[in-house]
Amino acid sequence: MATTKQTTKTHAARALRALALCLTLPLSPTADARAQAGPVVPLAERQASDGIALAPARFELEMPPGSETTVVVNLDYHSAKAGAQPSRILASLNDWTLNRDGELEFFRAGTLAGSASPWLIYSPAEVVVTPGSTHSIRVTVTVPKDATPGDHLAALVVEQRPDTIKLSQNARQMLLRFRMAALFYIKVPALTRGGSLAGLKAAAEGEGVLVTPTLRNAGNSVVRPLTALTISDAAGRVVAELPEAESLPVLANSELSRPVRVPKQLAPGLYTVKYRVDFQGHGETTEGVTELVIKDAPADPPLAATEASRP
């Protein structure tokens, strides 16, 4: 009897790296050397892991119409594996935005209103990065003389170039690639910001509480609110809280309604939820208040009487 042999080849690159909004300090057009991508990770910790880091992950450049500046995005390829191979990286431009749920979305360059992608030129577009070294991509931003006031957004996206894979009959192949982005806010004066708390809801969910604020920005430039939350019982005692922290940004002329989970299971009763928002001078500091009712768990239904047990 004839037999058939099937060879399975699996090619796996590095795990997919999630895109994130790093909360860094704003940059002036001439201050790109001071750019930060978040907390500094000790060298020993970076060398103990594998991957490619992108820094800075965010640029906020206030630039008048007709101005030009150049910034640098660095690629740091670190690997603890002996014999780690170079990786070919491609760069491209995208438009980006945050949707109402706070999710980061990318679009083809130049397709969104307020796109800054046509203002950016970068070099090199393709580079081979080697372990233990840092490679730079220079980005030049030129603001048109007729640019409208407000924030204009763009993203420099870097991703691993897919290797050439020769497919053979009866073979399975899989390739995982990373994709990262440096986000650009090009801020053209005159800038306005108008943050407000437009709504607040709270509900029990699973073993915690889900609090959903709705933050609104009526201005033409991003606001970065500081938020804090407390939950008090009927006697006024605080039973759960989240300390003040910076929330996701609220982009120009947009709303953000991202739920906040409080990982605490509360006993049945009536509670008061207070959500405080500090717009850092770009809107009135507001404390929203809403009630939260935790109901008793429904009792198990009584067992149906059997024929033998009925009177």
Image (tube, grey):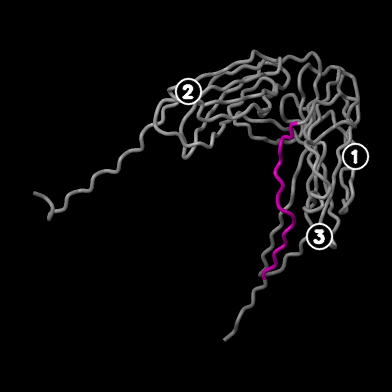
Is the Cβ of the residue at disc 2 closer than 8 Å to that at disc 3? Answer: no
Helix, strand, or loop for circle 1?
strand
Give percent across and percent down for residue 119.
84, 28
Magenta stretch: dominant secondary structure: loop
The magenta stretch is 8-23
Give percent across and percent down for residue 164.
79, 59
Residue toward you, 30 or 165 = 30
Q: Is residue 127 above or below residue 102?
A: below
Q: Residue at x 20, y 48 (%)?
A: 304
Q: Is residue 143 above or below residue 162?
A: above
Residue bearing mark 1: 123
| Left or right, residue 250 beside residue 25 | left
Q: Nearer the viewer, mark 1 or mark 2?
A: 2
Residue 248 image-quadrant placement: top right
Which mark is on residue 7? none
Residue bearing mark 2: 272
Which residue is most to the left? 311
- Please tell me whether residue 73 belongs to the stretch shown in magenta: no
Q: Nearer the viewer, mark 3 or mark 1?
A: 3
Which residue is most to the bottom? 1
